[in-house]
Image (cartoon, coloured by chain):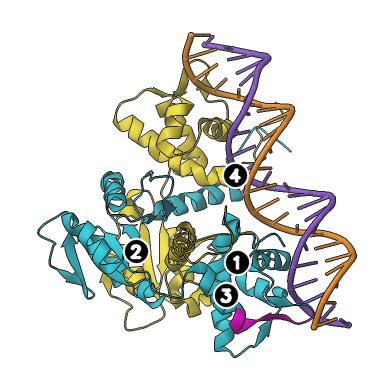
Chain colours: A cyan, B yellow, C purple, D orange
Amino acid sequence: MADRVRHIPEATVARLPVYLRSLAELVDEKTATVSSERLAEMAGVNAAKVRKDLSYLGSYGTRGVGYDVEYLLFQMSRELGLTHDWPVVIMGAGNLGQALANYGGFTDRGFPVAALVDADPSKVGQTFHGVEVHHVDDLPKIASDRGVRIGIIATPAAAAQAVADQLTAAGIRSILNFAPAVITVPEESSLRKVDLALELQILSFYQQHSQPDPEASGSRT
Amino acid sequence: MADRVRHIPEATVARLPVYLRSLAELVDEKTATVSSERLAEMAGVNAAKVRKDLSYLGSYGTRGVGYDVEYLLFQMSRELGLTHDWPVVIMGAGNLGQALANYGGFTDRGFPVAALVDADPSKVGQTFHGVEVHHVDDLPKIASDRGVRIGIIATPAAAAQAVADQLTAAGIRSILNFAPAVITVPEESSLRKVDLALELQILSFYQQHSQPDPEASGSRT
DNA sequence: GAGTGTGAAGTAGTTCACAGCC
DNA sequence: GGCTGTGAACTACTTCACACTC
């Protein structure tokens, strides 16, 4: 039994939110229990993976029955730290920053946008979708006043590293980077990236390699 | 030599665009050759990985010297299928769809937005950032007329699977899904996902587990 | 009988370490 | 001497298969 083993593989962590969403759907449709097989289907993975993933959280299933939807949902929310809100700041009040502030999906899911932050004084004071733009110099104050733990970088690539450093200086250790640039953060910080063009380039690769190119000559058979 | 070995690991494919970007920077600053070490630093990975990744494309380096920046950039663009444009359609002309149409980053990188597509007749005919909204019934025609091979799903979650099916029916086999929903596509199609809330939830997990919880009791040492 | 929990086997990806070439 | 290219060792993740519990 050896304490509660507290190391959950990264790959598993990345799937927990998908299970969470599936569980939320099951609650909506008033399903009381769910098998690993059903959950696997909903999450688009296989059943063995679901069972192994869930086993890292603890033994919350019942053999012969399945998992109690509500109980599992609660445990998973707790594990993911979603039992309370996490206010975020969006760095960069340009197109992307505004669009993200505008996008309801964050607030709805427990990540209210506490502020937009920009270096351009002409943007400071403006409001987008109810979110005010503050000057980057005020970041430390905003972060501590509003308990912001997560920063979203929505600046041009050239500014991304400097902005990451500002977030770090303001005590923000979780960063979601939308800028198409590689940034480095201290060891103890978490960094996730979303790079739209990169995803399209990956699709392009597979597109390129899918159809046997009619121009490919020379190699018969 | 056994032909040219044509299986590149997925993990490698996902890194190629990052190398590509680094190489583009090197070209800008007129650097002629680059070592795996330098490239690794720029891409935020380690040097052995760079060498192994590049070796899948072929032996484009020179021992004792490094890689010719321009030549490698060209080879990599070719491999990624970026020597020509790939027009895309954006499915869903709501907030997110409009924001994506508005975001210059796609067109700049060789993925011009051929059309926005929506089911709502009141949106059809409108223009966002120079991109016209078409009715979803016209999708097959648009796709074939404009050679669209990539579709971007920017609809609400509830519509995502139906839209994916419409894309498939229109012969589009590469899909980038922004909707917070699991969708399935035929075996031969490629699917990538971008889920903003999911990324924040992952950060929340690590945030939650980072600080040694002061309430954690019992285990001394 | 049904369905979880998990060791064991299998697979993919990473890193090491060094032979080989410039 | 410097740096690539790559087998070999290692690590992470996935899947299988079955003992175990309800």
Which residue corresponds to mark 3? A75
Residue A166 on image: x %, y % = 26, 50
Residue carrying label 4: A214
Q: Chain of mark 1?
A: B
Q: Secondary structure at mark 2?
A: helix
Amino acid type indicated by mark 3: Gln
Where does residue A132 sit, x and y in percent of width and height?
Answer: 19, 69
Q: Are marks 1 and 2 on the same chain?
A: yes
* Amino acid found under the numbered disc labelled 4: Pro
x 34%, y 35%: residue:
B25
**Quadrant containing the N terminus of chain B in the rendered view:** top right
Among the 4 quarters of the image, the one containing residue C6:
bottom right
Amino acid type of the residue tagged 1 in the rendering: Val
**Chain part drawn in magenta:** A64-71
Disc 3 crowd rating (10 Å Cα; few below 14, some 14-19, many 20+) is some
Q: Which corner quadrant of the image does residue B6 belong to?
A: top right
- Label 2, label 4: how many angstroms apart (C-alpha)? 33 Å
Q: Position of residue B19 (x, y in %)?
A: 45, 38
How many angstroms separate mark 3 from mark 1 (CA)? 31 Å
Q: Which residue is mark 1?
A: B185
Tell which of B35 and A19 is nearer to you: A19
User: Is residue B65 visible from the viewing direction of this image?
Assistant: yes
Give me the C-alpha separation between circle 2 and circle 3: 35 Å
User: Tag 3's secondary structure?
Assistant: helix
